[in-house]
Amino acid sequence: MKDAFGLPQSLLVLGGTSEIALATARRLIARRTRVVWLAGRPSPALEAAAADLRALGAEVRTVAFDALDPASHEAALGKVFAEGDIDLVLLAFGILGDQAHDEREPLNAVRVAQTNYTGAVSSGLVAARALQDQGHGSLVVLSSVAGERARRANFIYGSSKAGLDAFAQGLGDALLGTGVHVMVVRPGFVRSRMTAGREEAPLATTPGAVAAAIELGLRRRSETVWVPGTLRVVMSAVRHLPRAVFRRLPM
C-alpha cells in the first residue's frame, strides 16, 4: 500500500531499462519503495539496472516483457501481480525512431506505432484491470509534448504519442471511482541515450527532473504533469496557432 505521503511501496516498471523510469525508481527507493519489478526484454542492460537498484536496498526482480508481443502481456504482468499488490505501474517504454528513414521504410514507422501505442494500449489495459482488481494503485504513463501537435520533424513519433496520450486520458476517466489513479506525464525534450546526437529543443529537461515531477504528481494525485511546468503554457499557445504559422516555427 502507499504510505501516508501517497508514495508507493511497490513499483512495476514496464520498460525496465528506461532512463526516466530508473531515475524515478531510484528516487522512490530513497523514499519508501521497497519492492521493484523491472519488466523488459531479457538483456545484460536489464540485469545491470536491477543490480543498480538492489544496491540501493530494494528487493528487485525482473520479468520478461515485450511491448511488441501483446499476446504475452496478460501472462507477464499476471506473474507480477500474483506475487503481491503493486502500488504503482510506470509505463515507460517507447522508441523514437528515425523520421527521415522511417518515411522511406513504412514497416519501421509501423514498428514505432506498434511499440509506442499498440503495446501501451495492451499492457496499459492489463495493468489497469489488475490494479482495479486489487482496489488501489496508480498507473503513470510517460507520454510526450510531441503528442500535443504533430511536427514535420517527428510526426511519426508524435502521432504515436498523441494516440497514447488520448488513450491514457480516457483510461483515467474510465477508472474514476475505482481506487485507481492514472497520471499522464508530458516531458519536453529529454537529454538521454534515446536523444543523444539530436538537436536539442528549447526547454529541454533531464531524466532526474522528470522523476522529481513524477514524485510530486503522485503526492498531489495529479492527472497531468508537464516537465518542465512552463510547457503547459507554451503548448497551450502552440496548440492554437494557425497551421500556416505553425509550419514556419523553428521546432
Image: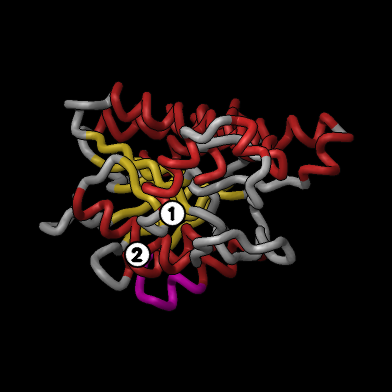
Residue 16 spot, x, y in % from top left: 53, 55
The answer to whether residue 55 is left or right of residue 32 is right
Local packing at callout 1 (Cα closer than 10 Å; few below 14, some 14-19, many 20+) is many
What's the magenta region? 52-59
Tag 2–tag 1 contact (CB < 8 Å) = no
Q: List the single residue furthest toward the bottom.
A: 55
The answer to whether residue 251 is left or right of residue 180 is right
Q: Is residue 53 magenta?
A: yes
Q: Earlier in the sequence, mark 2 or mark 1?
A: 1
User: Which numbered tag is attached to residue 212?
Assistant: 2
Q: Residue at x 61, y 32 (%)?
A: 159
Query: Up-down: is 200 above or below 142?
Result: below
Residue 180 spot, x, y in % from top left: 25, 34
How many marks can you see?
2
Tell me the element at label 2.
Answer: helix
Residue placed most toward the observer, 221 or 17: 221
Residue placed most toward the observer, 142 or 87: 142
| C-alpha gap between disc 2 and disc 1 | 20 Å
